[in-house]
Image (cartoon, rainbow, N blue to C red):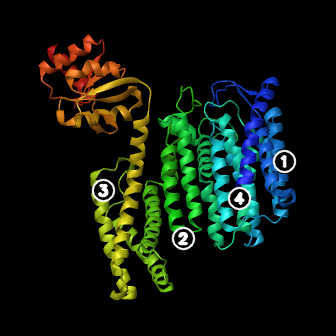
Amino acid sequence: MSDLGWALLPSALGVLLLTPLVIWLARRLEWVAYPREDRWHGRPTALMGGIAIYGAATLGLFVALPPGDVWAVWSGATLMFAVGAVDDLARIQPAAKLAAQVVATGLLLYAGYAFGAHWPLWLSLPITLLWVLGITNAVNLLDNMDGLAAGVAGIAAVVMAVFAGLTGSTTAVALGGAVGGAALGFLAFNYEPARIFMGDCGSLFLGFTIAALALVVQQQAAGVGQLAVGLVPLAVLAVPILDTTLVTCMRKLAGRPVSQGGRDHTSHRLVFLGLSEQHAVLTLYGLSLCSGGLALVVLFVDVTLFYALSTFLGIGLGVFGIHVARASVQRAGDARGDGRSATSLDPRRVLHDLFGHRWKAAGGILVDALLVGAAFVVAHYLRYEGGLTALRETRMLEALPLVVGAKTLIFYAMGLYRGIWRHAGTPELVRTGMATIVAGGAAFGIYIALHGLGAVSVSVLVIDWMTVTLAVVGVRFGFRGLRQYFAATRSGGRRVLLYGAGDAGMLTLRELRRNDALDRQPVGFIDDDPLKQDRTIQGLKVRGTGDELVQVCRDHDVDEVIVTTTTMPTDRQRAVSRRCGDANIPCTAFNVTVEPLQADREASTDEAEIAVQ
């Protein structure tokens, strides 16, 4: 692993020295990105940071490795850097950039680097082309918020370099270290608030080198299953793949060209959901680290277990992606949107139009089938920590399809696919728990029928039941959990203090967080119950009693007090109103009432008027 340090340190130091020079040069030559309606940044920022990244990565690589060892990779990367630089300064057609990417991929194929090098040529060649072009452009699309592309690319490069070091590939270690050092070092100038952008010359260069790095790792990895090695780069680069898929699908649904810029990337959607820019970028860093960590797991566990864990990660990212896709980034009149209607972009309605009202049930069955299969495998490996014997693995694989089929059928019969997941509550939790218990009994019966009572491991079946329950409940409540988490982090609007931390207070809090039109940000509770003092409810603290109302309002810059309880005595209401008046803070009440429909009230009024006449 010393090769990693020899490549990473020179490239990191090189980018720290080169970037200030590029910033100075960019400002002298007017290489500056000015704010535009379809871009996220709000102030003029220097461009062409890719010059520093390319120069530093080249330095780090050739310090650690003879140039001839990676001539194809670096020739293609240099071509991408040059094409990106021309595009930054003069703009070239997307078709020309695509043609250059095909040429660069051809260099990799000529040198023997291919995705699935042991697969038939008719399969390997188009997948290699799709992989390199896809990842190159994915990283390019990911360069949409300060520090995002550089950080994710740096994490991916370092993780693949570590993977290569553990599998004995010195070439990939040096390549990953050089690219990772340059990308991570660039964050000193590119992290929010950015002083310089990398531009296409940086993002295309990083995207191509990381895609090529994955091919080098695949070619030189030893002792790992070929299919598993093929999944490793998918795991490492899960974030750019997720972002590109999301952007492509949503822009197609909106009738927009994929190449057209916009504020509809994963990072932008996270901000619209309530995160700060830094929090959004750090969230995607965290996802990159988690998926990268999974890629390293394949070196320490059986391949079958790696497939099961990959299934869990893939479904988790899917839940995250679906929730993020529903963010209303296209709201008309929003300064950060593009003025398009949000309702026309709802992917759920598109799926409903294509597949009818049963599309959710079909999707739920597919997800649960994958979860059940993965949980069954994980349960065996958790029970037998030293690894499965050939006999146990054979029995597990024989029972697996029957267990998956039986459990999903039971889930369907017990109504697990009739609910709306983002509104899941206690009834859904109870129903899911009962369904997994019945399904666990079915798995027990299947094992007995196939292998006899003596072959049944009760520990495996108990662990399987626990894992399935956690997974199925996690997916269903994941949508609700994400919705509540993002609502709790949303900032902006009038700062309000909620008087009353009971059930009515919870109802008020949920409505304020759910309904953007109310434009209010809860900052805490006031409650007269001494047992609730200093407690935290839904992320908000009970900050005092009614006697401390004025001081709490001053300490937390409260703009409004909302009384949530409907049982407050009249004299207490007067006291609260008087205290708010003394602090010059509006005092309002939140109330839920059931009233006749407006049309009914109008009809009653008309009848009364007729009767009077």
Which of the two labelled residues, at mark 3 and mark 2, occupies the earlier sequence position? 2
Residue 447 in the image, given as x and y percentages of width and height: 38, 82
The residue tagged 4 is 2
In the displayed orientation, state which residue is furthest to the right.
68
Q: Are marks 1 and 4 in contact (CB under 8 Å)?
A: no
Disc nearer the start of the sequence (1/3):
1
**Alpha carbon of mark 1 to alpha carbon of mark 3: how far?**
55 Å
**Above or below — where is 582 with respect to 447?**
above
In the foreground, 338 or 230: 230
Q: Going from the N terminus, do you reach mark 4 or mark 2 first? A: 4
The Cα–Cα distance between marks 1 and 4, rounded to whole angstroms, is 29 Å
Q: Please state which amino acid type lies under the numbered disc 3.
A: Leu
Q: Nearer the viewer, mark 3 or mark 2?
A: 2
Find numbered disc 2 in the image and state the secondary structure of the residue it sits on.
Answer: loop
- Element carrying mark 3: helix
Q: Nearer the viewer, mark 1 or mark 2?
A: 2
Q: Residue at x 47, y 68 (%)?
A: 374
Identify the amino acid type marked 2: Val
The residue that label 3 is drawn on is: 429
Q: x, y (%) of residue 321?
A: 52, 49
Give the residue type that dot 1 points to: Leu
Give the quarter of the figure containing the N terminus. Answer: bottom right
What number is the disc on residue 301?
A: 2
For the point 44% across and 39% down, the residue is 486
Residue 123 lies, with reference to residue 201, above or below; the image says below
- Would residue 162 appear left or right of 125 to someone viewing this image? left
| Residue 549 screen position, x and y as percent | 25, 21
> Where is 234 relative to 123, above or below?
above
